[in-house]
Image (tube, rainbow, N blue to C red):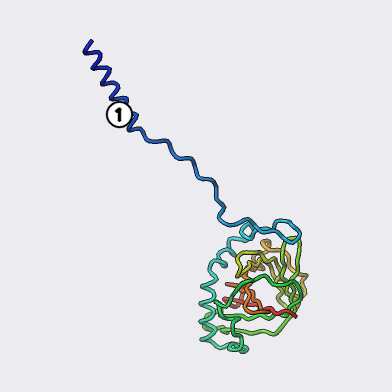
Amino acid sequence: MRLAVLAGFAASLVLSACATGAPPPPPPPPPNQPSYPAPPSSPTGAALMDWRGVITATDRDRYQRRDAAWSLALQQARRQTGSGDLQSLGDLIDPRAAFAPVVPPVGDYRCRTVKLGSQGGEDGLGYVVYGWFACRIEQTPRGLKFSKLTGSQRPSGLLFPETDRHMVFLGSVALAAEPPANTYGRRPDRDVVATLERIGDRRWRLVIPWPQNESNLDLIELVPA
């Protein structure tokens, strides 16, 4: 009888030790958290697309390296000869000039392109300041749309809300007498990624990092017509 009691007591100690040493069950997985807010709604109430679901891998890389484009392009512009009056551009060529709110009013604009830096290194022009052309910002069911209406290179595309200081532009370029472009993602050689920023009471700029040709940073200045 005494041996049976001792054996039972020992067994209970083993079971207790096993229960105490057993690992706790794993915690439940955390709920899925979105990495960015849901796309906003348009004035018509329809949800706008988010640019992250539209942008190509190549343009995503350009967008993420836009600070490097500013740095290299400005170094070249200040060191190399160019065409036009660089000093008169003021905040247009200041990478820190953007402020809120960024959303531009719908309507007709005057616009001009400024190219900074050279893909040809020291052999190219450090900057080129072009004349004024006609541009437009219009409201569409898919969101705000920017179009350059005149000139030999005419980008056109959608402006996606991002922060209070910049919007993301995804578009494509029509050349010469071609009809307005509306083919982002279909012709990589014509795709454009940019940020739209406000740099004055009635002054905006599109910042195009690592454009397809010639320069390392393109700026399109916009002022209401």
Q: Is residue 89 above or below residue 207?
A: below
Quadrant assignment for the C terminus = bottom right
* Residue at the extreme top: 1
Q: Is 149 on the left-hand or right-hand side of 127?
A: right
Q: Quadrant of residue 108?
A: bottom right
| Residue that appears at 76% across and 74% down | 107
| Residue that appears at 62% across and 73% down | 197
Front residue (pair 125, 7): 7
Q: Is 117 on the left-hand or right-hand side of 15?
A: right
* Residue at the extreme left: 2
Front residue (pair 96, 186): 96
Residue 172 in the image: state x and y as whole percent: 69, 68
Residue 196 in the image: state x and y as whole percent: 64, 71
Q: Secondary structure at mark 1?
A: helix
Q: Quadrant of residue 17?
A: top left
Residue type beneath disc 1: Ala
Residue 169 in the image: state x and y as whole percent: 65, 67
Quadrant assignment for the N terminus = top left
Residue 202 in the image: state x and y as whole percent: 68, 79
| Residue that appears at 39% across and 36% down | 24
Q: Is residue 182 above or below residue 26?
A: below
- Total marks in image: 1
Q: Is 14 on the left-hand or right-hand side of 176?
A: left
Residue linked to disc 1: 17
Q: Mark 1: give few (<14), some (14-19) or many (20+) Cα within 10 Å.
A: few
